[in-house]
């Protein structure tokens, strides 16, 4: 997953609007869906091939920075503010993508749902 996030960040910095990344994995697809929900990418689709498939991603112009959070830290819902201050430049600017018992979602949705989980990535 780190390679794909780095490819998205580099393509955004170079001004590219469409990229193809491999391999296609379910977790990466769910992370891309969250990024699409918050308008960090316009669209993505999966193209199946004999090596497992690849994602075709159309980027928007709104990505300033993105990255992976390692190690995947387990976080309780009440501690999300601490990690928001650590990984995002300002309050209510960007999202932290996390995996929860209710699926992959942003930290904002996790806070509304009252669930915790493990941190995966950040985007702003």
Image (spheres, helix red, strand yellow):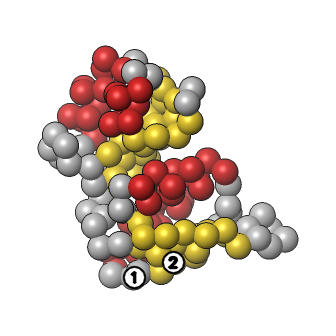
Category of crowding for the residue at label 1, using alpha-carbon neighbours closer than 10 angstroms: few (below 14), some (14–19), many (at least 20) = some
* Residue at the extreme left of the image, as rendered: 90
Category of crowding for the residue at label 2, using alpha-carbon neighbours closer than 10 angstroms: few (below 14), some (14–19), many (at least 20) = some
Residue 111: assigned label:
none
| Element at label 1 | loop
Q: Looking at the image, which is closer to me, 67 or 54?
A: 54
Q: Horizontally, is 1 left or right of 87 in the view?
A: right
Residue 1 against residue 12 in the figure, above or below: above
Which residue position is annotated with label 1?
16
The quarter of the picture where residue 65 lies is bottom left
Q: Looking at the image, which is closer to me, 109 or 2?
A: 109
Q: Looking at the image, which is closer to me, 2 or 123?
A: 123
- Residue 45 location, x and y as percent? 61, 70
The C terminus - image quarter: bottom left
| Element at label 2 | strand
Which residue position is annotated with label 2?
19
- Residue 120 location, x and y as percent? 47, 40
Residue ID at (15%, 44%):
90
Residue 67 against residue 115 in the figure, above or below: below
Q: Horizontally, is 24 left or right of 65 in the view?
A: right
Q: Are marks 2 and 1 in contact (CB under 8 Å)?
A: yes
Residue ID at (24%, 44%):
88
């Amino acid at each position: 997953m780190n390679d794909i996030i780095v490819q998205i960040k580099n393509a955004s910095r170079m001004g590219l609007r469409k990229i193809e990344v491999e391999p296609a994995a379910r977790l990466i697809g769910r992370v891309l869906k969250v990024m699409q929900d918050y308008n960090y990418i316009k669209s993505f689709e999966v193209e199946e091939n004999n090596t497992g498939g690849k994602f075709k991603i159309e980027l928007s112009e709104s990505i300033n920075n993105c990255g992976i959070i390692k190690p995947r830290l387990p976080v309780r819902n009440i501690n999300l503010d601490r990690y928001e201050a650590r990984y995002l430049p300002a309050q209510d600017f960007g999202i932290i993508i996390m995996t929860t018992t209710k699926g992959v979602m942003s930290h904002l949705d996790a806070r509304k749902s009252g669930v915790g989980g493990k941190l995966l990535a950040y985007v702003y």
